[in-house]
Image (tube, grey):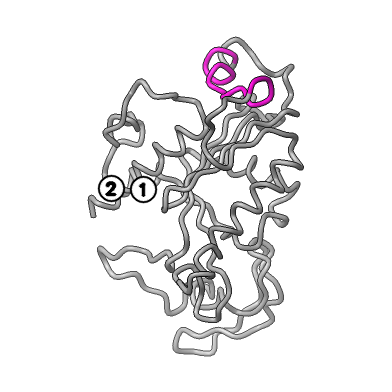
Amino acid sequence: MAPGQYTDVGNGRAEGTWQRCHACRDSAPHHAADTAGGVGFTMPAGSSVSTGGRVKVFFDTEFTGLHQHTTLISIGLIAEDGSTFYAELTDYDKSQVDDWLRENVINNLLGLELNAPAALPPDCYCGDTKTIARKLERWLSQLSTKDAAFGDRRNYEPNNTPQKIEMWSDCLSYDWVLFCQLWGHAFNIPKNVYYIPFDICTLFKVRGIDPDISREEFAGLDTNGQKHNALWDAKVIKACYERLQGAE
């Protein structure tokens, strides 16, 4: 993030020449309260950080290796309300697929490209990166607006704009980069997606739980589930988050 220029004017307030936050693409001084040199910002002991009521989406990706040039194989997402999105990409770099990936990831794909199962969950797709990006952007937009037709404003901010979607994953260093790369750049992600992602690994640590714990066992899920299938793993992340929040 490229910081703006602030002048402290006392009482924890800041004014200055902030022009644009390069991470969240918003203008104006909405960062002033929490980034003005730490002035006037305190966190009471034992308090938790509010997420502002954003819509939470839990996601996982499968990809062609832990290296700089990795490519996306599949992505799975599940929202708080249980709605899901799953996609398998056709343009990942197959030359990067080794024996471990073939056995543990490729074999857990639904096979949408070759033989689509007759009874798939809604919002399951197969296609190249541009196709999946378009489908996913539409799905994400529906999360912020789908209740509007029924007069339910839960997913709207006070100024009547759709709420931001808060993305959660697990050890998300690669997941977040590959999510952003669907649109070619972090600045190009859908505007209703909050620019800061969140990691349940950190939440485990904060709760005093070893982050290396078996996720399925912690969440009370079937340990024989389709591990390394992106949609299954996204569901596990959601279950872990819900149990961790219940531990407050």
Q: Is residue 58 above or below residue 151?
A: above
Residue 155, image x, y percentages: 48, 67
Check residue 106 for magenta coloring. yes
The magenta segment: 102-115
Vertical position of residue 173 compared to residue 36: above or below? above
Residue picked out by circle 2 = 207
Determine which of the numbered discs, if any, sits on residue 24 in the image: none
Q: Residue at x 66, y 17 (%)?
A: 97
Query: Residue visible at 76% across and 42% down?
Result: 130
Measuring from the top left, give residue 162's x and y in whole percent.
56, 69
- Residue under numbered circle 1: 203
Q: Residue furthest top?
A: 99
Q: Are marks 1 and 2 in contact (CB under 8 Å)?
A: yes
Residue 123 visible at all: yes
**In the image, residue 55 lies in the stretch drawn in magenta:** no
Where is residue 50 drawn, in percent x and y? 38, 66
* Element type at mark 1: helix
- Tell me the CA gap for discs 1 and 2: 6 Å
Image-based side of 70 in relation to 173, left or right: right
